[in-house]
Image: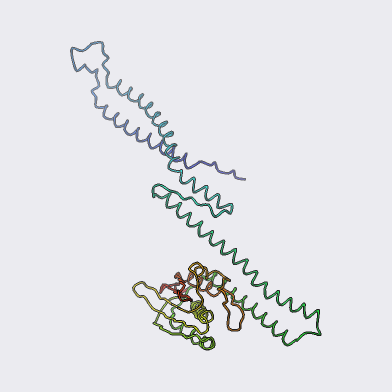
Amino acid sequence: MNSAPVRVSARLHLALSYAIFLVAAGAVVLFGIYLVLRYVPNYPLMPANPESDPALPVASRGEILRALLGMSGVLLLFLAVIGIVGGWILAGWILRPLRRITQAAVIASTGDLQHRIHLDGRNDEFRQLADSFDHMLERLHNAFEVQERFAANASHELRTPLAITATLLDVAERDPDGQDYPELVERLRLTNDRAIGLTESLLRLADANAITASGASTDLAHLTRHTLDDNADEARQREVTITVQLEPAPVTGDETLLTQLASNLVQNAIRHGGSPGTAHVSTRHDRARGMVALRVVSSGEVFSAEMAARLTEPFLRGAGRIVVDGSRGYGLGLALVARIVEVHNGTLTIVPRAEGGLDVNVEIPTQGLQTGH
């Protein structure tokens, strides 16, 4: 079995590197001095002032070079000590932000995603790394919170129709003769249909989360026009007046998902816009920015900015939001829209209107997905 490699800290690496560099630089300088002194004449030198003390030693070239070599060894040893000690101190100062980042990573690995580095000081690479790490922790924290709420709400939503079914069957079992079986069967059918619809919505959301396929060329305006035609009867029943302004909006994307996106936005405007209500649906192509947009402005209840920002969370419903048959919606429509927009590298903006309702704007790059496989 191989033994674990010896751990050497980055601080020690930097200190040794600094010391080696300092010693090497000193050696080069001393070697240059040594080369220059080789031009000193090779005979005993006379004092510059003949009247000076004759007892003063006069060195020859060889003696000067030997003294230089001896002193060079001492100087290089001194530079090595200075390099290691100074390098250790400098490396510790430079790597201090990295230790804070490492500490934050260790804390995050224990499951605490609320800790932040908040590194201040100069805007260098360490500061940028710390800010990026804080941003990543913020996104992870938000994602885990949404995931926890999704899991809790999904289990509750799936349990509700099953609990209703179990209750109806228990009542029928306890009093089989006092049951209106056609009504019981109809209630069981509606409850079962609701469970199936919820499951299919969850599967569509899961499919959108798993999208890796490439797209094809399509027209968002064309898809929206078909969606409006498919929902025209429901709009008439709900007394929702829809105005349309569809400009060609060519885009490269997943046609099925984009159809689902347009359908969810149109149905959301029809079903939650009040009765009577209004909706304005438009598409456009911004050639300068290379973007296509689908905008749906609808009437409806009054939302706060905070509530509107949370409407893309799964299972989150506005008060009193119902579908045509009288049952409550699943709260997955805008969550699926948000995921489809993300898959296509676009942006989703939901703004509450002061008079009630929502202004929903989707922008997708014309090359939202790459063609091919």
Q: Which picture quadrant has residue 168? A: bottom right
- Name the image quarter holding the N terminus: top right
Q: Residue furthest front?
A: 355
From this viewpoint, is residue 230 visible? no
User: Residue 292's spot in the image, x, y percent?
Assistant: 40, 76
Which residue is most to the left?
Answer: 50
Q: Tag count in the figure?
A: 0
Name which residue lies at 23% across and 11% down: 54
Query: Could you tell me residue 358's position as x and y percent?
Result: 47, 75
> Residue at left 23%, top 23%?
41
Q: How is the image coloured?
A: rainbow
Q: Is residue 223 above or below residue 351?
A: below
Locate residue 280: give its quadrant.
Answer: bottom left
Q: Is residue 110 visible?
A: yes
Please name the residue shown 53% across and 52% down the image.
Answer: 115
Q: Position of residue 158 (x, y in %)?
A: 65, 72
Q: 179 or 6, which is in the foreground?
A: 179
In the picture, measured across the screen, residue 288 lies left or right of residue 333, that is left
Nearest to the observer: residue 215 or residue 72: 215
State which quadrant residue 317 falls in.
bottom right
Question: Along the line of sight, which residue is nearer the eye, 225 or 18?
Answer: 225
Viewer-side residue, 245 vs 179: 179
